[in-house]
Amino acid sequence: MTTLAPGIHRGLAGVVVDATGISTVIQESNSLTYRGYPVQDLAARRSFEEVAYLLWHGELPDPAQLADFRSRERALRPLDRTTAEVLARLPETCHPMDVLRTAVSFFGAEDPTEEDGSPAAHRTKSLNLLAKLPTVVAADQRRRRGLPPVPPDPALGYAENFFHMCFGAVPDPEVVRCFEISLVLYAEHGFNASTFTARVVTSTLSDLYSAVTAAIGALKGPLHGGANEAVMHMLTEIGDPARAPEWLAAALAEKRKIMGFGHRVYKDGDSRVPIMQHALDSLVARGAHPETARLAALHAALREAMLDHKGIHPNLDYPAGLAYHLMGFDTPVFTPLFVMSRITGWTAHITEQLAHNALIRPLASYTGPGQRAVPAVTG
Ligand SMILES: CC(=O)SCCNC(=O)CCNC(=O)[C@H](O)C(C)(C)COP(=O)(O)OP(=O)(O)OC[C@H]1O[C@@H](n2cnc3c(N)ncnc32)[C@H](O)[C@@H]1OP(=O)(O)O
Ligand SMILES: O=C([O-])CC(=O)C(=O)O
């Protein structure tokens, strides 16, 4: 391991770079709050739409505010023809996160108010993205399955409508509820890498679409949001629950990172995991299929082996990855599902960054060659 000069914090580990009023992890009680409300209570009692409103406005909506928010979100869901055509031209070999990144960039290019950074303009743009991203994700999954898009249904809530656009049907309320819980848990998590990326872009006084496009790029990586997809690939690679300890020992010997485990902030377990694991358990209990039982046993066996070998706990991506598989989503779509939720946290942070802006520009300790003369050109 490289020894760093004093004062260097590689990866900004442990560095507090600004203040935020949006969310916090309370280490002593291993809990997470959004605007002061414990996330487990929000997941149990509130819809994802209410949580989005809370993150953006600072307070939960009253019934009239919620009704207005819901009707505006529902009206904004359809994609215009040009956007649908642009996205349909992207090669099917590209990752669904590339489709989302392109979509957000295109929404910015189409928006004549792109440069308007006022809080009111930000709220309109954020709601537009919240409403349209599921339409993009669902149409993309269907295209890859060789199916035409299913238009959004304004009679359905956010989570139900997403299932409807993906599969042409809404599953049992219990499955929809598990999905909604995952959206609430994924919505916001402080200065994580993608949110920080959005804040860096915003700090130059660039526009919201540029910040969100960059955040999608940061979330795609497997050390961050890409881990929920990577969990499923890993479970497929291991295959048999009995193989989990031996597979893990070999992977750790090769210094591989085990996807869905570990966290920069939580060292004794991610506060969101018990809630998501409970939702996953309820999905497993519904599935009579032997494949579901095998995957659940494998998931548990790897979690136990990781705790035994390394003492490292799972993060939210570990139960969310398998839960999304059991809900019927294709594996490459798992990280876009994270985007559909985190768009709320990103845009709340973009607005907060602008309200107290300072250009984010750290320093580096130089380790290259000392100053030297440029040699004369020969020949
Ligand atoms: C929603 C989210 O974005 S949550 C994060 C999702 N990402 C993942 O699941 C990817 C796998 N996890 C990891 O790579 C890491 O745990 C991270 C990137 C999340 C956090 O990393 P850091 O805070 O930088 O911790 P760091 O990588 O220094 O780990 C500390 C020690 O634990 C080990 N460790 C941490 N996580 C893992 C893991 N998943 N697999 C194997 N070893 C691990 C490291 O190898 C290191 O060991 P060492 O001290 O012997 O070198
Ligand atoms: O906080 C982090 O570093 C990663 C994470 O769990 C999240 O973004 O939800």
Image (tube, grey):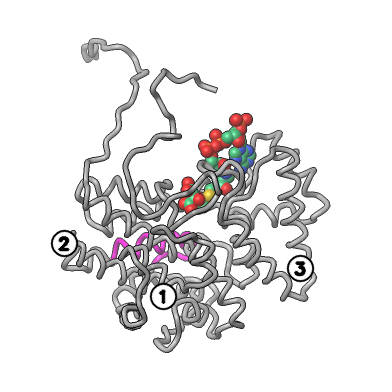
Quadrant field for ligand 1: top right
Which of the two discs, 1 and 3, labels the residue nearer the N terminus?
1
Q: Main secondary structure of the magenta part?
A: helix
> Which residue is under mark 3?
291
Element type where label 1 sits in the image: helix
- Closer to the camera: disc 1 or disc 2? 2
> Mark 1 packing: few (<14 Cα in 10 Å), some, or many (20+)?
many
Q: Amino acid at mark 3?
A: Glu
The magenta-colored residue range is: 90-106
Q: Which residue is mark 1?
A: 135
Query: Are the residues at dot 1 and dot 3 in contact (C-beta closer than 8 Å)?
Result: no
What amino acid is at disc 1? Thr
Can you tell which mark lies on residue 116? 2
- Tell me whether the residue at label 1 lies in contact with that at label 2, contact meaning CB atoms closer than 8 angstroms: no
- Residue labelled 3 has its Cβ within 8 Å of some atom of ligand 1: no
Q: Is residue 103 magenta?
A: yes
Instruction: Judge the density around disc 2: few (<14), some (14-19), many (≥20) Cα neighbours within 10 Å.
Output: some
Q: Residue 22 in the image: x percent, y percent?
A: 36, 55
Q: Earlier in the sequence, mark 1 or mark 2?
A: 2
Extreme residue in the right direction: 242
Q: Is residue 26 above or below residue 47?
A: above
Q: Amino acid at mark 2?
A: Asp
> Considering the numbered disc 2 on the image, is that residue within a helix, a strand or a loop?
loop
Q: Position of residue 52 (x, y in %)?
A: 38, 67
Give SS at disc 3. helix
Question: In which quadrant is the C terminus drawn?
Answer: top left
Residue drawn at x 74%, y 68% is 292
**Location of residue 49 in the rendering, given as x and y in whole percent from the top left corner:** 41, 73
| Image position of 56 (left or right of 181) | left
Q: Residues within 10 Å of mark 3 (few under 14, many from 20)?
A: few
